[in-house]
Image (spheres, rainbow, N blue to C red):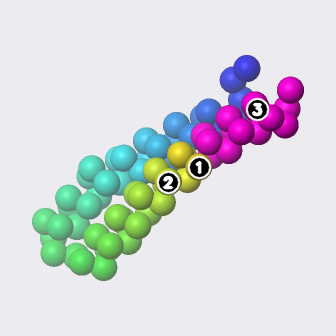
Amino acid sequence: MITFNYYTIMLLLLSGILVLCFDVKIYVKENMSKEKKGALFVGWLNITLSGLSLIGYFIYDKWFWK
């Protein structure tokens, strides 16, 4: 069963990867250190939240739902 959680996980993962790939490079090129740190934090936060959400969903689906 596909629920909204898979879409949320994909959106968090893709947005985190895109922030790390594009925004961080732009901020490094423009010598914007505070913005670079913020983009790194937000990118890794999105990737971490997607992983935690995926693990939490599987735990919930495996032990609590069925």
Residue 64 is left or right of residue 24, and the answer is right
Residue at image mark 3: 61
Asked whether the residues under the numbered discs 1 and 2 touch, taking CB atoms below 8 Å apart as contact, a structural biologist would say: yes
Q: At label 1, which amino acid type do we have?
A: Leu
Q: Position of residue 43 (x, y in %)?
A: 40, 57
Q: Residue at 41% across / 58% down in the picture? A: 44
Q: At label 2, which amino acid type do we have?
A: Thr
Report, in whole angstroms, how far the alpha carbon at label 1 lies from the one at label 2. Answer: 6 Å
Q: Nearer the viewer, mark 2 or mark 3?
A: 3
When the figure is inspected, residue 6 is found, relative to residue 40, above or below; the finding is above
Asked whether the residues under the numbered discs 2 and 3 touch, taking CB atoms below 8 Å apart as contact, a structural biologist would say: no
Magenta span includes 5: no
Tell me the SS state at disc 1. Answer: helix
Q: How many neighbours does mark 2 have within 10 angstroms: few (below 14), some (14-19), or many (20 or more)?
A: some
Residue 65 is left or right of residue 37, and the answer is right
Residue 36 is left or right of residue 53, and the answer is left
Q: Earlier in the sequence, mark 2 or mark 3?
A: 2
Q: What is the quadrant of residue 66 in the picture?
A: top right
Asked whether the residues under the numbered discs 3 and 1 touch, taking CB atoms below 8 Å apart as contact, a structural biologist would say: no
The magenta-colored residue range is: 53-66
Tell me the SS state at disc 2. Answer: helix
Tell me the SS state at disc 3. Answer: helix
Q: Please identify the dominant SS of the magenta region.
A: helix
Magenta span includes 63: yes
Camera-nearest residue between 53 and 14:
53
Q: Earlier in the sequence, mark 3 or mark 1?
A: 1
Q: Residue at 17% across / 67% down in the picture? A: 28
